[in-house]
Structures are given as C-alpha cells and as structure tokens.
Image (tube, helix red, strand yellow):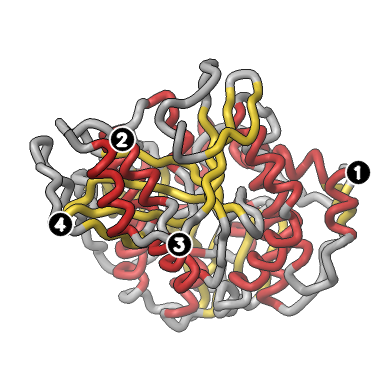
Amino acid sequence: MFTGTTPPEVKVVLQDIMSRVDCKEVYVACSGNFNCDKIMHGMGFTVHSNDVSLYTKLAADIVLGKDTTPMTCTNEQFARIFDQWEEHPYKKLIEVMYVMSISRFTSQKNIYEEEMLQAFLEKHMAYYLSTREKLGKGAFNFKIADFYFGDFVDFLKAKRGTGGVGIAFPPTYKGGYEKIYKAVEETFEYEHAHYNLFDPKEAESIHVDLLTNDRNIVYTDRPYESIEEFLTAKIILGKGKHSVYLYSSAEDKQHKKYFVERRTKSLKSKYVTIPPDFEFKEDTNISCKLVEVENVNYYKDFYMANKVNYTNGGDLGMIFFADGMAFGFCSFSKMQSNLDELFCLADFVVNSHQAKLSKLLIMCELSHDTQMEIARKYGEYYQAIKTPVYTNNPVSMKYRGVFKLAKREEGKLTYIGQFGKESITNIYKSWLKKYKK
C-alpha cells in the first residue's frame, strides 16, 4: 500500500537476529512504509519509529491516532480535487499518495501517459474512496510507541544508554529522499523535518559509530571493510540488483552468519498455451476465464512487440482457451474504464499456424460469456469494450469488421465493440465458417 519495500530475505534475517536479542525496545530509523516496524511489533517489541518524509509522518499520525501535521496544497488543480473529498482520518495521506501516483504520468511522454493522467484526474473520487477502503482493511493494524520526525542519525544517537536495539536502512544514494518525493515537495507546504542530507560517501564513518558505540543493525547495498567484523548477512538479490549487506552489533554473544541467494528463476504462468500446429476443429471447446493480470503480462513478453511495453499494467486479465489450452490473452484497466465501456489495454494471441486467430480472439471478447464472467466477479455490467490502437494507418485490419472505429487521432485509433448475446460457442462456429480454411 505504501511506497518502499524491504526485501523479504532481509525480513527473515532480522526476525532471526531479534529473536535472540535481550531487549524490549526497538528503534526503527528510516521507517518508510513501516515494514520493519510491523515485524518488530508482531514480535512483541515496543517500537519507536523515525523518518523525514511527509508521507511516513502522516501514516504515523494515523497509527498513533493523532493529527500533528498541518499542510496546505499549493497546486490549484489538486486543491480543487481535494476540496471535493470528504474529511476522513486518512485524507491527508491519500492526498500525498495521489500526487505520488499521478506524478508518474505528468511528463506525458507518450499517449499512454497522457491517457493515464487524464484517467487519474477524471476518476479522482473513485481513487480516493477505493484507497480509503483498502487502507481501512488492516493497513494500520500495528502499534508504535512514538514517532521522531527528523534525522535518523540523531534519532539513533539519542537512544544510547536505553539498552534498546536500533535498526536502520539509510538512503543508498545522495538526495534519494528528495528525488522520490519531489512531486510531493512541489505540491504541499508543511513544516519540514530537520535533517542532514545523507551522502553515502560519508556513510562508512556513520556506520562505524553506530555499530561500535551502541547496539544497532544497519543494512545497506555497499560493503565496508572497516566494519567487516560486524558483517552478519550477505543477501544476493539476483541479476541487475545490488546485494544487501547487513551489519549487526545487536547481540551480546557471537552472532550467526547468514548467506542468502534469491532464486532467480521467475515464476511462470500456470496456464499452458496451444502448440503452433494446433488444429481448430468442429468439436474444439472454446472457453474463457478471468485470471490475475500477471498471468497475461507474463505471456505479453513472448507475443507482443517490446515497443508497447506499457501494457504490463492492468487490473484484471482474461484468457481464452481451446480444449483447455490458452490461445488468446486480454488485460483490462478499470481505472481507464467508464460505467459502460471496459478499457482493454492489450489483447494478443500466441504464435500459431492458424490464420485469423486474432479475429477469433476479438470476436470472443464480445461474447455474452465474457460479459457475464466479468459481471459475476466484479459486479460491473459493461456494455462494450474500448481499446486504443497506436498506428498511423487509417484503419486496423485486426479490429475491422468486429469493432467499430470510434475516433481517429494522429498516431492513434480508438475502437469500440459492443457485447452481444451470442455465446462463445456460437461465436466460434461463426468464425470457423467464415475464416477457417
């Protein structure tokens, strides 16, 4: 729900270390999304949290049941939007989350970003209500004793003599916080935390001080020879990712050593595709099923051009099967849909010797079975499917004759297909008669 993550391997190591520590108080520096704080609270520790971001400060207010963060939106467009949202304990936090989410598309580098920006602006109320509902389902079901809004080094130094253990994951590059929250800083006025701009080049001396003069755990993506005696774990996250090094002076006795390597083999979709020479026959059983959109995006990398990699998004996926094997895939975006039209981000078929397979897919998309499958699961009775085609051609031969051209713009066509009353079985028979050779 929040921004920022702690690798699961680090969480496991932290839990193992802290299970042997004889203290009751834990001081989590750079709390971020409160991953570590939640773990420590679950283990029975009294948790003291810290960060310098407005985002984390507002979340801490919610956990503590307080409102200690006056802030003003200085962006007129956003201010008008936020004025329409009813007051709620989560409202300020969701305002920040909204700005962070929409900022990914404000540069409008391509048509996809333009459409996503427009969707966020038009459906701001839906975003507010759905996010509020999600947050209310357990996002704040943990406790912290207090929250220090300031420099993490000052926070950890101040706890010396308490016997408690500090846990810190400082920024890994200079100005890291400032780059992540740039849009937030440009949108809101509030009383900022006082802190020194953390420079990883100076990190070594800070880590030496924290580890040699107190009980602390520090994890970073850089190895340091000067604190090698405190090296407790090396976690290899895989190709293209920095390894994580965890240093600890938390235990009184000799600490254990951990070496963890993440499995690099990605999880495949459980759905099997038809072979290239699959023959579509009169008695072939055609069916469809709603699936997690990741199952569609997995196959997108095999069967779609890389230039349309923005289709990796989506809220729901659908797979079309021939005799139980997948031949076509669709991903849909509820954010870009309206009450009547379901927005299709991508639809594609597998590599096959069978001609006009794409026609079968888009014909099946408009079947009564597809419409009802979505209605039963999501309670949305869409009347049509809308999809963009990014091309300079006057028409799309793929959609021609099945969908209707609704709008023509420079570099883009918009097609809309109405759901019909035909079953997917009857649609298949029609396709066989018209296209199968």
Number of the label disc, if any, that sits on residue 421: 3
Q: Which residue is mark 4?
A: 323
Q: Which residue is mark 1?
A: 76
Disc 4 and disc 3 in contact, CB within 8 angstroms: no
Seen at 30% across and 57% down, the residue is 426
- Identity of the amino acid at label 3? Lys
Q: CA gap, disc 2 to disc 1?
A: 40 Å
Q: CA gap, disc 4 to disc 1?
A: 55 Å
Quadrant position of the N terminus in the picture:
bottom right
Q: CA gap, disc 4 to disc 2?
A: 24 Å
Depth check: give the residue in front, 354 or 270.
354
Q: Nearer the viewer, mark 4 or mark 1?
A: 4
Seen at 58% across and 33% down, the residue is 405
- Which class describes the residues within 10 Å of circle 2: few (<14), some (14-19), or many (20+)? some
Q: Earlier in the sequence, mark 4 or mark 2?
A: 2
- Identity of the amino acid at label 1? Glu
- Identity of the amino acid at label 2? Asp
Disc 4 and disc 1 in contact, CB within 8 angstroms: no
> Left or right: where does residue 216 sit relative to residue 188?
left
Q: Which residue is mark 2?
A: 301
Q: Quadrant of residue 328?
A: top left
Q: Is residue 10 visible?
A: yes
Query: Which element carries disc 2, helix, strand or loop?
Result: helix
Q: Nearer the viewer, mark 1 or mark 3?
A: 3
Q: Position of residue 421 (x, y in %)?
A: 45, 62
Query: Which element carries disc 4, helix, strand or loop?
Result: loop
- Identity of the amino acid at label 4? Asp
